[in-house]
Amino acid sequence: SEEDEDAAEGEGRADLRLFDLKDGRERTLIKGEVDGFFLSADGRTIAVELKDDRLRVLPAGVPPPLEGDEDSGDEEDECTRGSGLVDLERIRLDVDPGAEWGEIFLDAWRLCRDERFDEDR
């Protein structure tokens, strides 16, 4: 049935909701397409991991602009400052495997030394 297909399609996805402690109200910021989120250290910005491997960065507590919202001046699916969507295709990361391996080795060594070493054995 269509309901089963819709449920399977959205499986593992959730809503992003805001609970206001001052007035005790809850509201939905993003409905049914959230895979995860990360809040900045200062609590002012939130990065929301959306379905289809998209990323949206917004001021915390502010709903994203709606499609056709005249105030944003942007389309919902366009990667612009107003929409908050990040174009992940433009991000490039240079990795030095040798340096990464050295860092991983040292981190693993420190973890074993600090957490697993027992002088009594």
Image (spheres, rainbow, N blue to C red):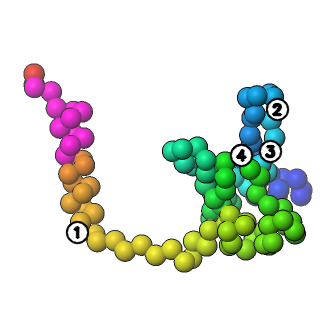
Task: Choose mark 3 or mark 2, whichever is in front.
Answer: 2
Q: Is mark 4 on a helix, strand or loop?
A: loop
Q: What element carries label 3?
A: strand
**Depicted 75 relative to depicted 1: above or below:** below
| Magenta stretch holds residue 14 | no
Question: In the rendered view, does 13 fall on the left or right side of 25?
Answer: left
Q: How many residues crowd around disc 1 within 10 Å: few (fewer than 14), some, or many (20 or more)?
A: few
Task: Choose mark 1 or mark 3, whichever is in front.
Answer: 3
Q: Residue furthest front?
A: 71
The residue carrying mark 2 is 25
The residue carrying mark 4 is 61
Number of dots carrying numbers: 4
User: On residue 28, which mark appears?
Assistant: 3
User: On residue 98, which mark appears?
Assistant: 1
Mark 2–mark 4 distance (CA, rounded to whole Å): 13 Å
Q: Are marks 1 and 2 in contact (CB under 8 Å)?
A: no
Q: Earlier in the sequence, mark 1 or mark 3?
A: 3
Q: What element carries label 1?
A: helix
Q: For residue 64, which quarter of the picture?
A: bottom right
Does the image show residue 11?
A: no
